């Protein structure tokens, strides 16, 4: 795997998806075993398992226990959201879209997830704090934090929607974290959201996620308004 600035999971998923689109494996064909795939792509079994699970959610493959992994649908269908199209979405529009989906996902995660998800999110929030303080790659962990919430909500359709723009969201997080005091605010909300989910407090979890996204929207709107005022009129 190359150092592309995205997580190993996301890079693995992208490469698997590209191979499906390019027809490396035909419709109905059985894929190599998970262990073989992990060795081929140079990743852990855990990473490969998560990437394959995402492809199954997308409808590209079928994981049949005891039988193997099969290409299920036309893999070209997974390109319904074109990467270039998504990359052109303004950051403010993306945040508004997140505001419509993620608070409810977070409430569902608090309601439906088990203690493992809650504990994992608490540890991840602590890791985000540590990496922000010491200059580590916190952006990938930030994205994974929200991916775990989507997984814990146990709503496959919504999880697919969130994951469909993962690659662009990594870039958007790099931009939002340049906003004034955003790193400190982000750590604060991640910690509170993780605690609310661990305590199965769905209402508080929903409210905190909405506040977290609003905390990015407000300064971004202010910057946009200032930029618009500076532009010369026709």
Image: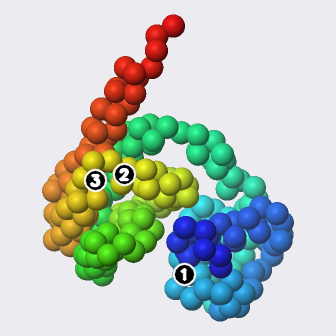
Residue at disc 3, secondary structure: helix
Query: Would you say 162 lies left or right of 109 here?
Result: right
| Disc 2 crowd, CA 10 A, few/some/many (<14, 14-19, 20+) | few
Q: For the N terminus, which image quadrant?
A: bottom right
On the image, the x and y values in percent for residue 183 come to 28, 59
Q: Which-is-in-front pick, marks 1 and 2? A: 2
Picture residue at 64% right of the left edge, 50% below the top: 83
Is residue 207 at all visible to an observer of this figure? yes
Q: Are marks 2 and 3 in contact (CB under 8 Å)?
A: yes
Distance of mark 1 from mark 2, alpha carbons? 29 Å
On the image, the x and y values in percent for residue 204 come to 15, 56
Is residue 117 at all visible to an observer of this figure? no
Q: Which residue is mark 2?
A: 178
Picture residue at 34% right of the left edge, 26% below the top: 225
| Disc 1 crowd, CA 10 A, few/some/many (<14, 14-19, 20+) | some
**Dot placed on the residue nearer the N-terminal end, 1 or 2:** 1
Q: Which-is-in-front pick, marks 3 and 1? A: 3
Residue 37, picture quadrant: bottom right
Q: Which residue is mark 1?
A: 47
Residue at disc 1, secondary structure: helix
Picture residue at 23% right of the left edge, 60% below the top: 184
**Dot placed on the residue nearer the N-terminal end, 3 or 1:** 1
On the image, the x and y values in percent for residue 95 come to 39, 43
Picture residue at 36% right of the left edge, 72% below the top: 135
| Rendered position, 96 above or below 80 | above
Query: Would you say 24 lies left or right of 75 here?
Result: right
Q: Which mark is residue 182?
A: 3
Distance of mark 2 from mark 3, alpha carbons? 7 Å
Q: Nearer the viewer, residue 175 or 163?
A: 175
Q: Nearer the viewer, residue 52 or 16?
A: 16
Q: Which mark is residue 135?
A: none
| Disc 3 crowd, CA 10 A, few/some/many (<14, 14-19, 20+) | some
């Amino acid at each position: 795997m190359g150092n592309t600035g995205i997580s190993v999971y996301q890079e693995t998923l992208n490469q698997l998806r590209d191979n499906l689109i390019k027809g490396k494996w035909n419709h109905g064909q059985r894929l190599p075993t998970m262990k073989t795939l992990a060795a081929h792509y140079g990743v852990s079994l855990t990473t490969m398992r998560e990437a394959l699970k995402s492809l199954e959610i997308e409808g590209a493959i079928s994981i049949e226990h005891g039988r193997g992994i099969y290409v299920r649908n036309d893999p070209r269908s997974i390109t319904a959201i074109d990467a270039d199209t998504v990359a052109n979405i303004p950051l403010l529009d993306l945040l508004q879209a997140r505001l419509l989906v993620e608070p409810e996902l977070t409430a569902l995660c608090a309601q439906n997830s088990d203690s493992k998800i809650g504990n994992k999110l608490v540890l991840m929030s602590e890791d985000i704090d540590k990496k922000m303080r010491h200059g580590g790659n916190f952006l990938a962990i930030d994205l994974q934090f929200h991916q775990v919430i989507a997984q814990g909500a146990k709503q496959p359709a919504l999880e697919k929607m969130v994951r469909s723009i993962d690659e662009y969201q990594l870039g958007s997080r790099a931009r939002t974290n340049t906003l004034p005091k955003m790193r400190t605010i982000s750590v604060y909300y991640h910690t509170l959201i993780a605690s609310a989910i661990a305590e199965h407090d769905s209402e508080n979890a929903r409210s905190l996620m909405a506040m977290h996204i609003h905390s990015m929207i407000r300064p971004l709107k202010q910057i946009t308004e200032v930029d618009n005022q500076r532009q010369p009129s026709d």
